């Protein structure tokens, strides 16, 4: 009986099928005819998708029952010895199969006709919505939703035109509402598993479940309602739709609340202060206790995506996203994790700091924080960038705007510029700021928070700063005065403003980014660094601050350097044994090397097989922490026993 | 438990308007039942409820002793249903419509369908929408009869039919079916349709069955009485069975149902100058029942 009904339903839609096939032929013809017009070629298949499928869904859905009422055949159909559920199911199956047939046909066209597939899958909505926005499946879901609404409503009327328009308006309104609610509920931050569009998952689920709710409402209405009474029919459909939509939306709300977030991932490198290592992940900030291999989480339980953190004066200042909407906030706590305090939130509670505020510094004694915020306003073409510095006491009081930044430092606000606080120098009580106020200019500045005094220490074409000395009074940086020219490395004394050359790399294969990897000794008297002349060819060097020159330099390249070697296999270096030795990580050779102060290899330590291909070293007290970039794990090597242990 | 169909306490309202109020009736196999009622009295509603096309508010519908619900479907295999208006799919051919129906009815008799097609002069290749009203009705009969129903429900099917079709075809088919043991419920507002074919009569009025009696009894027990008085008419004795009363000049016309022999004595005791007693046509009985206010009839419903 189901088959009989199915065939009857198919037969009744013959005209629609022919009409749809005709439109597909027209699409194909138009696409091939306008092959020379790039604009039309792109518009035709996308426009077809946007218009044809919702339209055919509305036509098919609204015709489900209305024809039976219009032709008076509903009494005939209902008086056959077949269950109402079977009739309903046959209608649904027939109509959905026709929809699916059109989809498959279009997919076939995409596969067969070169160009259509590429245009559709590559179709991008405006820039704000680009990556991750899968247009194609969304149209499928959207038309399924339109279909379900029309299918349900078709029980109510025998006027198909009204049904098509009614379903279109109701369907569009609900879709807009669902998109808005999904956006609000699932959030737009980084804490959910939906990538750049966490709300899209919720929206997709909402579309599917709401479609099913409309279909279920239609089934219950069809099975139990009195078709001879329009009012009762409407009330029954309203009642069932309300019940099933409520159920669907509850499920979506539950799913949104319970879905797991992103897997925990490393955010940035490991910072070491007094032999203790700190690192941040998408879940929080962790402390690794140096000699011990215990890892403790410093941030509060729950989701907390740490964006950035600085350690100074016994305090940790850290920013991150919390809550479902990934509200941005800056917190402070003691270095042992105690006395956590919210300093700045970007929510309505803290309107003072607007826009982005990822960049900040702590004063040497940890009592004051300086935060750099950016307001980006206006449209894509006429944006203004406004950079502001704020200061706040780490007890949460005294939020104030610092004197404005010089345009030479902060840019003119019309074109893109960048600014980064590198350190807070103790001796000069000023901030060291790296700035790119405009294209083709980089500079290093000092800025005194107390007075607003600003001074440019160095300006050049391309400047890449390295680490600041432990006391915050000197910085090592690389400068490339000409594009593709030699790279000069300097050490800049922030207090005296004295600039000393460290070395110059004049090699066509060298990049300004592959020079540094610099590490200060704990006392701050020497800097060890690696300079890469070309892929796989690198040397280690030690600069003495007191001697104002390189005291050692040694080529440590592999025996057969390969120019194709990926930069991810770059080596890394750090001081160990109280600045008497160096540890060198060489991923290419799958080992760590202990170097003496003469840079001679004293010992070679093979890495465990389970350690990933790409890794970097960071000394922490008597141990070396090895950050495995491939597997996103952290290993600990005990330098006394040479024991390896995976600690995170 | 010989009933083919039994309905007890069936009620149905459209909005706040009650259409059926506690309707009860029984149909036995091989008999033809007339369901009389004016337009809009709920005949179609009653039949649609039996067919499970619309739900009922209250009451029990049983087929061969088994109660059926709105959700049930299997029982419809035993029922032929011929509605007031053609309700087939216009795009189907007559042949395709028969094939379509055949799949739903296990007892489908294709030979009989083919015979009936010839008998009623229907072209299997014709599209349903091209058939005349009479042809569509004939097609409905072909469909209903090929399923070999044990119960046939006719919902006022004769309006728009030409006289020969109505008179001969309908009577012939219905009688033939009843002879085969099918119970038939023939709903109509045209009383003369039922003359000579019904065994039993129901009159539906005001949402209730106001008459439930065999045709013979109705014919035998209904009287029109005209009382003529020379002077002032005396007060009439309280006769419970007077269902209609009308003054014509000095004469008084009474419709009495059911008529008892002693009623004549009672009326003669009034010393009328004239007393005419005559049998009533079915139409007069029907009109008398449905012209009266609803409340006055309640006690006359069953005799």
Image: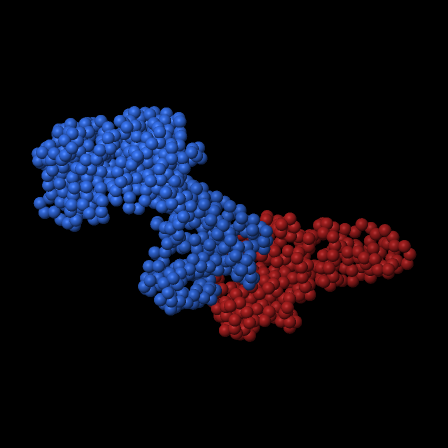
Query: Is A509 left or right of A245, judged from the image as shown?
Result: left
State the residue at coordinates (41%, 55%). Answer: A139
Give the colour in which the image draws chain A.
blue
Query: Is B284 left or right of A172, judged from the image as shown?
Result: right
A301 shown above or below B119: above
Quadrant of the frame with the C terminus of chain A: top left
Quadrant of the frame with the N terminus of chain A: bottom left
State the residue at coordinates (33%, 36%). Answer: A359
State the residue at coordinates (45%, 51%). Answer: A211
Give whichever of B147, A44 is nearer the camera.
A44
Which chain comes out red in the rendered image? Answer: B
State the residue at coordinates (30%, 25%). Answer: A365
Q: Quadrant of residue A104?
A: bottom left
Indicate the position of residue B130 as horizontal and vertical percent values. 55, 72
Please indicate, yes or no, whether residue A603 appears anywhere in the rendered image. Answer: no
Q: Quadrant of residue A541?
A: top left
A353 shown above or below A232: above
Indicate the position of residue B98 as horizontal and vertical percent values. 49, 67
Indicate the position of residue B298 as horizontal and vertical percent values. 71, 50
Give whichever of B111, A615 is nearer the camera.
A615
Please indicate, yes or no, whether residue B167 appears anywhere in the rendered image. Answer: yes
Q: Quadrant of residue A391?
A: top left
Give whichever of A426, B70 is nearer the camera.
A426
């Amino acid at each position: 009986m189901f088959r009989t009904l199915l065939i009857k339903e198919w037969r009744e839609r013959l005209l629609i099928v022919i009409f749809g096939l005709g439109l597909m032929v027209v699409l194909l013809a138009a696409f091939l005819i306008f092959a020379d017009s790039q604009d039309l070629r792109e518009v035709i298949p996308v426009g077809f998708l946007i218009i044809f499928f919702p339209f055919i869904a509305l036509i098919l859905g609204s015709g489900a029952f209305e024809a039976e009422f219009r032709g008076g055949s509903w009494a005939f159909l209902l008086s056959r010895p077949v269950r109402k559920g079977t009739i309903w199911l046959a209608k649904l199956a027939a109509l959905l199969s026709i929809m699916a047939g059109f989809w498959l046909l279009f997919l076939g066209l995409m596969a067969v006709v070169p160009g259509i597939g590429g245009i559709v899958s590559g179709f991008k909505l405006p820039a704000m919505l680009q990556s991750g926005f899968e247009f194609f499946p969304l149209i499928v879901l959207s038309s399924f939703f339109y279909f379900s609404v029309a299918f349900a409503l078709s029980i109510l009327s025998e006027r198909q035109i009204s049904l098509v328009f009614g379903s279109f308006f109701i369907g569009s309104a609900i879709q807009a509402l669902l998109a808005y609610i999904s956006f609000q509920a699932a959030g737009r931050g980084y804490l959910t598993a939906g990538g750049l569009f966490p709300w899209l998952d919720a929206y997709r689920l909402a579309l599917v479940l709401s479609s099913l709710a409309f279909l279920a409402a239609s089934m219950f209405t069809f099975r139990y309602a009195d078709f001879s009474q329009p009012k009762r029919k409407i009330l029954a459909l309203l009642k069932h739709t309300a019940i099933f939509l409520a159920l669907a939306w509850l499920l979506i709300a539950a799913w949104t609340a319970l879905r797991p977030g992103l897997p925990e991932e490393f955010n940035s490198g490991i910072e070491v202060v007094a032999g203790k290592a700190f690192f941040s992940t998408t879940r929080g900030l962790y402390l690794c206790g140096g000699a011990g291999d215990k890892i403790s989480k410093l941030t509060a339980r729950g989701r907390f995506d740490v964006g950035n953190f600085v350690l100074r004066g016994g305090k940790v200042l850290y920013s991150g996203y919390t809550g479902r909407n990934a509200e941005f906030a800056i917190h402070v706590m003691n270095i042992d994790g105690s006395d956590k305090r919210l300093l700045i939130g970007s929510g309505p509670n803290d309107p003072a700091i607007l826009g982005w505020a990822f960049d900040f510094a702590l004063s040497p004694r940890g009592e004051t924080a300086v935060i750099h915020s950016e307001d980006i306003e206006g449209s894509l073409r006429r944006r203004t960038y406004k950079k502001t510095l704020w200061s706040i006491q780490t007890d949460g009081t005294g939020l104030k705007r610092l004197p404005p930044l010089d345009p030479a430092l902060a840019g003119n606000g019309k074109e893109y510029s960048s600014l980064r606080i590198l350190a807070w120098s103790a001796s000069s009580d000023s901030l060291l700021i790296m700035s790119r106020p405009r294209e083709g200019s980089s500079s290093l500045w000092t800025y005194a928070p107390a007075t607003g005094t600003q001074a440019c220490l160095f300006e050049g074409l391309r400047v890449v700063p390295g680490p600041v000395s432990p006391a915050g009074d000197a910085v090592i940086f690389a400068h490339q005065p000409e594009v593709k020219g030699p790279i000069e490395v300097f050490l800049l004394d922030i207090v005296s403003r004295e600039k000393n050359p460290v070395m110059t790399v004049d090699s066509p294969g060298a990049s300004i980014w592959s020079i540094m990897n610099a590490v200060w000794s704990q006392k701050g008297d020497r800097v060890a660094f690696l300079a890469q002349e070309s892929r796989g060819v690198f040397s280690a060097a030690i600069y003495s601050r007191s001697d104002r020159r390189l005291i050692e330099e040694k080529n440590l390249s592999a025996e057969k350097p390969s120019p194709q070697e990926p930069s991810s296999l770059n080596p890394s270096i750090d001081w160990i044994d109280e600045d008497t030795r160096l540890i060198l990580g060489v991923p290419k050779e799958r080992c760590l090397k202990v170097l003496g102060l003469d840079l001679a290899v004293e010992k070679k330590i093979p890495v465990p097989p389970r350690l990933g291909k790409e890794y970097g070293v960071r000394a922490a007290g008597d141990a070396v922490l090895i950050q495995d970039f491939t597997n996103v794990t952290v290993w600990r090597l005990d330098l006394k026993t040479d024991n390896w242990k995976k600690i995170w | 438990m010989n009933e083919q169909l039994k309905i007890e306490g069936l009620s149905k309202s459209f909005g706040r308007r009650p259409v059926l109020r506690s309707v009860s009736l029984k149909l036995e196999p091989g008999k033809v039942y007339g369901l009389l009622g004016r337009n809009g009295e709920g005949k179609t509603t009653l039949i649609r409820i039996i067919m499970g096309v619309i739900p009922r508010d209250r009451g029990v519908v049983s087929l061969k002793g088994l109660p059926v619900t709105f959700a049930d479907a299997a029982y419809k295999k035993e029922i032929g249903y011929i509605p007031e208006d053609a309700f087939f799919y216009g795009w189907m051919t007559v042949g395709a419509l028969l094939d379509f129906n055949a799949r739903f009815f296990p007892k489908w008799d294709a030979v009989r369908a083919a015979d009936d097609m010839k008998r009623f002069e229907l072209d299997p290749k014709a599209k349903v929408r091209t058939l005349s009203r009479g042809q569509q009705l004939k097609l409905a009969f072909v469909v209903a009869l090929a399923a070999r129903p044990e119960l046939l429900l006719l919902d006022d099917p004769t309006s728009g039919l030409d006289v020969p079709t109505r008179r001969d075809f309908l009577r012939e088919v219905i009688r033939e079916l009843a002879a085969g043991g099918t119970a038939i419920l023939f709903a109509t507002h045209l009383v003369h349709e039922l003359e000579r074919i019904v065994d039993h009569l129901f009159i539906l009025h005001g949402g209730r069955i106001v008459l439930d009696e065999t045709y013979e009894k109705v014919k035998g027990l209904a009287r029109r009485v005209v009382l003529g008085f020379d002077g002032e008419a005396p007060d009439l004795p309280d006769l419970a069975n007077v269902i209609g009363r009308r003054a014509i000049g000095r004469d008084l016309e009474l419709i009495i149902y059911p008529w008892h022999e002693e009623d004549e004595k009672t009326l003669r005791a009034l010393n009328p100058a004239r007393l005419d007693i005559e049998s009533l046509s079915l139409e007069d009985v029907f009109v008398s029942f449905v012209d009266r206010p609803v409340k006055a009839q309640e006690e006359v419903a069953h005799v």
